[in-house]
């Protein structure tokens, strides 16, 4: 019997350790997902972009060829921890150089998680222009049963391209005339399309993997006369919890089980609509009802009914996601040995400061630096939102525990204060995920465990805010990081050389006796300072302006030709 057993074991091993390879040529594609034609960034001549599907334990290799000609690119695998492979995380100028046009670059990492993830460009707002797709990690031992699996993406969509919108957003004109408001999306898409039909058979359990791949808007999702049972949030299994409506901030994911009806007597509408409270007053999407239809189709010969709008209340606001309890019952980590208070968004300080003060670091407080964290630390991020809008905060390479969070509101100030006894009030089994919505003028306490050496980006996932600098970096366990012996692949170094970006030394590329010499620091670090627009545009349209634009966006490459 023994040989048989070991043969079986070997086979199992082989099954659980496949290599999944994708060869992707990134290029412009003409698209029209909502009837309005525009160019989008697609893959292998196609858009929507393909899904990555793999099993837990698999090695994923993505060979990227940048054929955009006029823009750089880079790809982040959202929610993937990248343990030991920090150099594969993807954000341009944080863990890699942007990939220049004409160059290729290989991402290579092992999946050690399960659930619903996604990938997206991480340079210059490029994912808003289309470069994004699902990343599904199957689990042969998933703690729930289902008959069939369906992927559903929701996303906000702009008719204008992101580089233009970023310039508009950060322009003095927008600041003076519109109070610095974010561009409002033109439409909502389901599966990067509209009027999508999901074919359903009676008496089956469907696992819907739902991803908000948008850049700004939170989305409500409701299926007429079908409740959904949440079983996973952001790659974390949860105790099954039944709800009639989902509410997904940008970048969040939910796996839900939908039990189909017992007969095919009718079809049912699925409604998806944007949370308009995040849009500045007076601006609404051009599509008159800012919502997108799709259907659960039991019988293709029967009509596609309109959604029952009276069943669609915006109670997502009160649908506190902290009720989704991790299935593994992990208690709050502790003891906490460091607290980091953060105020967001410094961006608004920067946008509204007078010209003679905008460069003065004192007005931003002293927290614009990167944070060095030590291995084993348990850190509480105490975040107060001084803005009336909600911000979905995302941490790379980790799930954090949500120890405290104020409920929706108060919207219009004054900001709520984090209770001093928040630790005593903390839930026993806190929600764990990688993206959490912090409500307008509210607060959150996020707890992270420093156990994954690398450069860990933490940022608002509203892409306009990323571009404006609402990001910070944790230098996580740098000593252990050096001991990992990561060898940067030659292709990665080539991308830097082609772009004229240093690959060693301090943030200014200085070394030797000059490690502590950061004089002239602006261009590179400015992008990642916490909220501070330390590098405002020079006046006029001279070469300095062009250089400033490149440094801000990382995506423009005209000077390289
Ligand atoms: C979806 O259906 C509506 C209503 O029939 C129609 O106005 C719209 O153009 C359709 N969208 C697309 C992208 O076909
Ligand atoms: C790059 O080229 C595409 C396709 O022609 C165009 O739509 C896009 O606006 C260009 N990007 C920039 C930054 O000029
Ligand atoms: C995989 O994940 C488990 C638990 O999440 C962790 O203990 C282990 O170290 C990880 N393995 C690797 C190779 O990263
Ligand atoms: C929805 O999108 C996913 C991911 O792109 C795709 O796999 C699936 O086939 C789509 N479903 C429908 C009904 O279009
Ligand atoms: C079909 O299912 C619906 C919903 O469960 C139910 O209301 C209806 O009575 C059923 N119709 C028939 C013909 O069984
Ligand atoms: C939609 O797109 C057009 C131009 O492409 C723009 O002018 C308009 O203001 C956009 N926004 C909304 C919210 O309609
Ligand atoms: C529409 O929703 C309302 C509120 O939930 C409900 O009372 C009504 O019966 C629904 N109508 C249909 C046709 O399902
Ligand atoms: C910021 O200031 C506080 C209080 O003066 C101090 O405790 C903290 O160490 C400073 N942080 C940095 C990054 O300088």
Image (cartoon, rainbow, N blue to C red):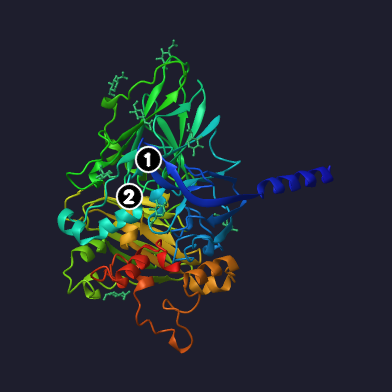
Question: Residue at the front extreme?
Answer: 561
Rendered-image quadrant of the N terminus: top right
SS label for mark 1: loop
Residue 495: x, y in percent?
52, 66
Residue 54: x, y in percent?
59, 45
SS label for mark 2: strand
User: Dot 1 corresponds to which residue?
Assistant: 37
The yes-or-no answer for disc 1 within 8 Å of ligand 6 is: no
Rendered-image quadrant of the C terminus: bottom left
Q: Is disc 1 surrounded by few (<14), some (14 to 19) or many (20+) residues within 10 Å?
A: few
Label disc, if present, on residue 437 of the rendered structure? 2
Residue at (39% x, 49% y) in the render: 129
When asked about the image quadrant of residue 194, the answer is top left
Q: CA distance from mark 2 to mark 1?
A: 32 Å
Residue at (32% x, 53% y) in the render: 404
Residue at (49% x, 51% y) in the render: 27
Q: Is residue 269 left or right of residue 282?
A: right
Up/down of 520 relative to 318, above or below: below
Up/down of 200 relative to 31, above or below: above
Up/down of 535 relative to 213, above or below: below
Residue 538: x, y in percent?
26, 71
Residue 453: x, y in percent?
51, 67
Label 2 or label 1, whichever lies nearer to me, is 1
Viewer can see residue 515: yes
The earlier-in-sequence mark between 2 and 1 is 1
Question: Residue at the bottom extreme?
Answer: 513
């Amino acid at each position: 019997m023994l040989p048989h057993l070991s043969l079986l074991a070997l086979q199992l091993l082989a099954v659980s350790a496949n290599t999944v390879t994708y060869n992707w040529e990134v290029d412009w594609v003409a698209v029209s997902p909502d009837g309005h034609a525009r160019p989008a960034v697609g893959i292998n001549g196609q858009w929507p972009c393909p899904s990555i599907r793999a099993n837990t334990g698999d090695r994923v290799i993505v060979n990227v060829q940048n054929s955009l000609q006029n823009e750089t690119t880079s790809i982040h695998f959202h929610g993937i921890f990248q343990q030991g492979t920090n150099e594969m995380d993807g954000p341009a100028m944080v863990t890699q150089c942007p990939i220049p046009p004409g160059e290729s670059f290989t991402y290579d990492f092992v999946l050690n998680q399960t659930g619903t993830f996604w990938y997206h460009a991480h340079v210059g707002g490029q994912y808003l222009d289309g470069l994004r797709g699902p990343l599904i990690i199957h689990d042969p031992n998933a703690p729930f049963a289902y008959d069939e699996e369906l992927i559903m993406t929701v996303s906000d969509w702009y008719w204008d391209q992101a580089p233009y919108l970023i310039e508009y957003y950060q322009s003095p004109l927008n600041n003076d005339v519109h109070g610095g408001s974010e561009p409002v999306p033109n439409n909502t898409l389901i599966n990067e399309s509209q009027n999508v039909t999901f074919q359903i058979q009676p008496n089956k359990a469907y696992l819907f993997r739902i991803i908000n791949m948008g850049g700004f808007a939170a989305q409500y999702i409701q299926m007429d006369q079908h409740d959904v049972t949440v079983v996973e949030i952001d790659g974390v299994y949860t105790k099954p919890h039944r709800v009639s409506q989902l509410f997904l901030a940008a970048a969040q994911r939910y796996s839900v089980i939908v039990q189909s009806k017992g007969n095919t007597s009718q079809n049912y509408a699925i409604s998806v609509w944007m949370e308009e409270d995040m849009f500045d007053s007076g601006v609404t999407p051009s599509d008159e009802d800012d919502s997108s239809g799709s259907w659960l189709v039991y019988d293709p010969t029967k009509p596609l009914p309109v959604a029952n709008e009276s069943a669609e209340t915006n109670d997502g606001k009160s649908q506190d996601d902290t009720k989704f309890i991790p299935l593994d019952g992990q208690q709050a980590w502790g003891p906490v040995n460091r607290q980091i208070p953060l105020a967001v968004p410094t961006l608004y300080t920067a946008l509204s400061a007078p010209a003679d003060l905008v460069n003065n670091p004192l007005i931003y407080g002293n927290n614009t630096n990167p944070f060095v964290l030590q291995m084993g630390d348990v850190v509480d991020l105490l975040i107060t939102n001084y803005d009336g809008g909600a911000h979905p905060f995302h941490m790379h390479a980790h799930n954090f525990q949500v120890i405290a969070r104020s409920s929706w509101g108060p919207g219009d100030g004054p900001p709520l204060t984090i209770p001093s006894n928040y630790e005593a009030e903390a839930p026993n089994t806190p929600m764990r995920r990688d993206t959490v919505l912090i409500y307008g003028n509210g607060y959150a306490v996020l707890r992270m465990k420093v156990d994954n050496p690398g450069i860990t980006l933490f940022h608002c996932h509203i892409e306009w805010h990323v571009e404006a600098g609402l990001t910070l970096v944790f230098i996580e366990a740098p000593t252990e990081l050096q001991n990992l012996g990561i060898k940067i692949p030659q292709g990665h170094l080539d991308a830097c050389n082609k772009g004229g970006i240093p690959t060693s030394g301090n943030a200014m590329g200085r070394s030797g006796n000059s490690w502590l010499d950061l004089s002239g620091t602006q261009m590179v670090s400015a992008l990642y300072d916490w909220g501070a627009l330390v590098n405002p545009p020079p006046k006029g349209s001279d070469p300095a302006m062009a250089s400033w634009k490149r440094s801000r966006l990382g995506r423009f490459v005209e000077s390289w030709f």
